[in-house]
Amino acid sequence: MNDESQSEIILYEELEILEADIIHRHEQAGQVASGKTRASFLIQSSGLAGTLSGANYVGVLQQGRKAGGVPKDFIEILRAWASAKNISFSDEKQFNQWANAVKWKIIREGTKLYRSGQQDIFDTPIESFNKRLSSRIVQFYENELVNEIFKF
């Protein structure tokens, strides 16, 4: 196996650990409803470059949603969230009252997470990823260098 292949393997393994750490923190924070966010994470790796991406809204996992506008289909988003959380309503009127109250609270004040401070969903995992990756790559190339020196 050549040096570049081994470096690619190290990078991919570390991206997998990063993804698992982020998902674990997301779950520990009680943020999972349907599992759609968790399933949106994707590792892509090509050569010595790699990324871990997620749905366009994953930033709210750490910071919450600030006060302001909400998507046009927000009531339907709340319906799906309530369903995933097994929250039921006696009738459509009760649901609509609840959904509108939640919608306007978020529009005026932001989400509870935004108001209370952030969760550490990404910061520590990314810092740990950087340290582990650097350490593993340096160790790998140090070993390769020593092996080359002692070949002669």
Image (cartoon, helix red, strand yellow):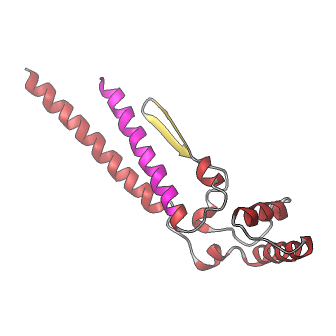
Q: Is residue 65 left or right of residue 127?
A: right
Task: Specify the farthest residue to the top.
Answer: 152
Indicate the quadrant containing the C terminus: top left, top right, bottom left or bottom right.
top left
* Of the pair 95 and 63, the residue shown nearer to us: 95
Query: Which residue lies at the image location 32% right of the left edge and 31% below the top edge?
Result: 6
The residue depicted at 85 percent of the width and 72 percent of the height is: 95
Extreme front residue here? 90
Quadrant where the N terminus lies?
top left
Q: Could you tell whether 35 is left or right of 24 in the image? A: right
* Residue 18, x across and y down, in percent: 44, 51
Considering depth in this image, is 111 or 30 the residue closer to the camera?
A: 30
Q: Is residue 19 left or right of residue 145?
A: right
Q: Is residue 121 left or right of residue 128?
A: right
Identify the residue at horizontal 28%, vertical 47% (top origin): 135
Residue 53 pos. (x, y %): 57, 46
The correct choice, above or below, for 94 with respect to 50 in the image is: below
Residue 23 lies in the magenta-colored region: yes
- The image quarter containing residue 86 is bottom right
Q: How many marks?
A: 0
Q: Residue 98 at what x, y percent from top left?
A: 83, 76
Q: Is residue 102 above or below residue 60?
A: below
Q: Position of residue 77 (x, y in %)?
A: 78, 60
Residue toward you, 29 or 34: 34
Q: Going by the picture, which residue comes out furthest to the right? A: 93
Q: Is residue 71 magenta?
A: no
Q: Which residues are magenta?
A: 1-25
Most frequent secondary structure within the magenta stretch: helix
- At 47% from the left and 61% from the top, the residue drawn is 123
